[in-house]
Amino acid sequence: MLLATLKEIRTYQWVKNILIFVPLVLSHAYTNKLLVTDSIIAFIAFSLCASSVYVINDLCDVESDRSHPVKKYRPIAAGLISIFYAKVLALFLFSVSLAIAFTLNQEFLMVFSSYFLLTLVYSFALKAIAIVDVLILGSLYTLRVIAGVVVIKDEISYWLIVFSLFVFFSLALLKRFTELKNLQARNKTSGDGRGYVVGDLNLLLIMGTISSYISVLVVALYIHDPVMIVKYSTPMWLWVVIPAMLYWLSRVWLIANRGELNEDPVLFAVRDKVSYLVMLVCLFSVILAI
């Protein structure tokens, strides 16, 4: 039961919430122990909240998951966890996450609440609407970044938000693209409960790659902004981020187009050594620039 529960709450997905620490690094506040502690608390709150949403999603999709070649192995669909237990688990996870969120400032609580409500609206109404669904998914990633900003009481950066919207819109499209690729491999034309058909593959590829490259352009414009650049002692190191991002985004879309990417880009990144290397290059470039 314990292993099934851990699998159900998808702890590997918690890696998404590392985005909460991005504003901490970019604002150079990572030496402030209080802000670091608050960011860690925010990370835990978002992680538990996200897990509760995963359980809710699986409860909603249990019938369609049972007919899916991969999702049928999820604990609820496979019968490893009862429906009643899953409901109690979702309620428990959200209650704990909300209690933790209340220990932080009011602005964080508002972002946290917005995130949870948006995920519910997505799960019950919007995930079946083409394009709207990926906009919502991209927004959920961006809300994590905003949560990281408000928890350290920093100003919300226009550059950071614009970058987040474009790069996460691209990754959301990537998820849909790989789902359609897998449908195509099974000689199907559309999936259950989604607003896309296999014929949309080329369009999703174009939109996703363009959006990813625009996000890199936003970073380049940020580095060139004389107002922002004064925050760094050796800003030339930031230019290393550009080719690193171009490489990773191009590579992940190339792999997806070959049909070699798992439906979940996050799971791919967690298991991919090259992704870790690119992340380290970007992290050290920012640290050296500071």
Image (tube, rainbow, N blue to C red):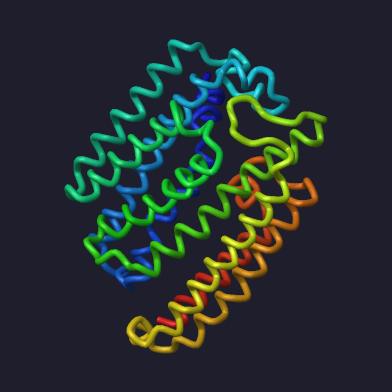
Could you tell me residue 240's position as x and y percent?
57, 79
Depth order, front residue of 279/65: 65
Q: Is residue 255 above or below residue 3?
A: below
Name the residue located 53 percent from the left edge and 31 percent from the top edge: 128
Q: Residue 167, how many percent across, how many down?
A: 52, 59
Q: Position of residue 60 (x, y in %)?
A: 49, 20
- 44 or 139: which is nearer to us? 139
**Snapshot quadrant of residue 186:** top right
Above or below, comparing residue 60 to residue 208 in the picture: above
Location of residue 200 in the rendering, given as x and y in whole percent from the top left corner = 69, 43
Q: Quadrant of residue 248?
A: bottom right
- Relative depth, front residue between 84 and 69: 69
At 35% from the left and 64% from the top, the residue drawn is 23
* Residue at x-position 71% and y-position 45%: 201
Instruction: Decide which of 62, 184 is in the foreground and name it.
Output: 184
- Horizontal side of 232 relative to 188 (left or right) equals left
User: Taking 260 as reference, is 239 above or below it?
Assistant: below
Residue 241, placed above or below residue 127: below
Task: Identify the residue shown where x is 43% and y is 56%.
Answer: 19
